[in-house]
Structures are given as structure tokens and as C-alpha cells.
Image (tube, rainbow, N blue to C red):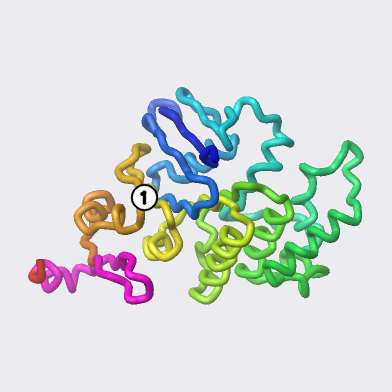
């Protein structure tokens, strides 16, 4: 099976600032891929490159073994769905209307929903546990509810790849787990490839089958959580003291930034 995503020597600059530097990587089909790194390291830009929303200065992108340049916009939208960090609520769409937007790439020129579209929208809402909110407006929902609706829209799109930009930002722990468990269930049950940008290193450890660490637009390390989430490496990239031990839940790394007032005891243990 071809990789879900292949990047070959991708480079990108905004004026004099180089945002991505000769990035090459493969994302296996059906994997939960987490992208981590400090603020301004190029994570969201890389996600936009994969989605075909950002042109590059150099390099090539392939989706499911085909050059990205060979996809039309509508065809690409049947393969890739994007869940942004912030979804606009300026217009009073209902939950059902929002989820049905995911069917747009599959509709004809008339763009009229058919029974199959409504059925798939309902299935997506049931999968994300928002079907009881179908007639509510987005601006009437909590942050966690709204995020599940946007994910339902992505599921209704029936993509092979879902790209998420910090989907758990500003959510409480319970809603974080609901979102993450939803994506893992989607990966397991439908073999959907999940590509997620996150600042939460422990979520990357708990869910990521493949982790990519970038800094200043370049790849620092790629591999399993155990290979990437190492104390010396993280301290060098993030510029702060870290404590890394083993999470008893599954034997993966557990990461904790160390406040200054606790730094001497931690250093003394080394």
C-alpha cells in the first residue's frame, strides 16, 4: 500500500523567513501521526502543505501515491478533510447543516443533497455523539460540542486522511479525551489516516503511532513516541527542563515540563 502522504524536500519561505527547510517524510496509511514542536516551528504550515492549501518553493507532495498536483480540488476533498483549530461561527448554521457541508465534494453541479447525504450526515453525528444537537446553531454550542461537530463534518466527507490543527486546544481534559478517543476509533474502525498538530506531548505519546518533532522548519526526529520523546532531545528543542518517565498506562513516555522551583531536585537525580 502506498503511503498516505509523501513529502520530498519541501521548502517554503515567507519573504526572507524560511518556514520549512528541505522536509522529507512519509506518513503510513492508517497511522495516527502526531506533529510536535515549539511555537513558530512550521507545524501548521506543514499541515497546510499536505492539504494543498499552501504552495511550496521547492519539493513535491504525493497523496496516496499520486502527485498532489494531479488532483483537482474536488477530488482532493474526497481524499483529505481538514479540521481547523478555529471554525467560524459568523453565520448561524445548524449542526446538521454544518455536517452536511462535508458532502459537498461528492455532490453534482446542482449541489442538492440526496437521501444518502442526509443518511451519512446522521451517521457522522451519531458517531461523534452530536445527533441530539442537529437543530442547534453552532454559536449555541460549547467548545467541545462544536469541535465534535466539525469532526462530524470531516467524517461525513468520507476522506482517507483527516488533518487536525490542535483539535484539543482550549478544551478541558474530559473533552480532550473524547476528541482523541473519537479519532482513534475512526482510525481503528475505518483505517483513516490521522495527522494531528499538537502542543500536548503526552497526547502525542498516548495516541501517536508515529511522531514528528520539528524546529525552525526542519525535522529534528521522527519515529515512535519512545524514540522521539527523550529528555535530552526535548530539552534541546524546547529550551526548558523536562522530566520524562514511563506512563504506567501503556509503557509509553510521560513528559512533564519542570518549573524552576523544582529544577535543582530534578538535576540532582541525573
Residue 179, image quadrant: bottom right
Residue 48 in sight in this render: no
Q: Is residue 130 left or right of residue 169?
A: right
- Residue matched to label 1: 37
Q: Residue at x 30, y 43 (%)?
A: 220
Viewer-closest of 9 and 142: 9
Q: Quadrant of the C terminus?
A: bottom left
Q: Residues within 10 Å of mark 1 (few under 14, many from 20)?
A: many
Q: Is residue 27 above or below residue 205?
A: above
Which secondary structure lies at badge 1? loop
Q: Work out whether 198 lies above or below 206.
A: above
Can residue 3 be seen from the camera position used here?
yes
The residue shown at (67%, 37%) is 76
The part of the chain drawn in magenta is 244-267
**Which percent across, then down, holds residue 172?**
51, 73
Q: Residue 178: image x %, image y %? A: 57, 71
Q: How many numbered badges does the structure rendering display?
A: 1
State which quarter of the image contains the N terminus.
top right
Amino acid at each position: 500500500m502506498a503511503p498516505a502522504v509523501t513529502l520530498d524536500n519541501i521548502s517554503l519561505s515567507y519573504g526572507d523567513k524560511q518556514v520549512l527547510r528541505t522536509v522529507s517524510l512519509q506518513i503510513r496509511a492508517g497511522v495516527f501521526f502526531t506533529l510536535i514542536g515549539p511555537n513558530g516551528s512550521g507545524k501548521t504550515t506543514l499541515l497546510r502543505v499536505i492539504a494543498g492549501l499552501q504552495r511550496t518553493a521547492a519539493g513535491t507532495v504525493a497523496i496516496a501515491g499520486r502527485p498532489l498536483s494531479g488532483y483537482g480540488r474536488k477530488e482532493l476533498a474526497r481524499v483529505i478533510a481538514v479540521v481547523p483549530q478555529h471554525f467560524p461561527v459568523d453565520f448561524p448554521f445548524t449542526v446538521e447543516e454544518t455536517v452536511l457541508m462535508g458532502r459537498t465534494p461528492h455532490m453534482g453541479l446542482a449541489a442538492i443533497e440526496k437521501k444518502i447525504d442526509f443518511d451519512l450526515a446522521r451517521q457522522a453525528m451519531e458517531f461523534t455523539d452530536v445527533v441530539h444537537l442537529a437543530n442547534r446553531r453552532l454559536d449555541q454550542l460549547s467548545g467541545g460540542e462544536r469541535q465534535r461537530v466539525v469532526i462530524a463534518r470531516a467524517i461525513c466527507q468520507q476522506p482517507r486522511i483527516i488533518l487536525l490543527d490542535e483539535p484539543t486546544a482550549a478544551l478541558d481534559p474530559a473533552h480532550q479525551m473524547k476528541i482523541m478517543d473519537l479519532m482513534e476509533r475512526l482510525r481503528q474502525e475505518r483505517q483513516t489516516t490521522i495527522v494531528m498538530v499538537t502542543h500536548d506531548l503526552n497526547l502525542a505519546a498516548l495516541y501517536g503511532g508515529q511522531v514528528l518533532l520539528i524546529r525552525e522548519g526542519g525535522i529534528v526526529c521522527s519515529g515512535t513516541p519512545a524514540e522521539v520523546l527523550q529528555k535530552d532531545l526535548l530539552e534541546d528543542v524546547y529550551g526548558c527542563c523536562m522530566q520524562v518517565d514511563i506512563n504506567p498506562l501503556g509503557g509509553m513516555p510521560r513528559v512533564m515540563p519542570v518549573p524552576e522551583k523544582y529544577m535543582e531536585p530534578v538535576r540532582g537525580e541525573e
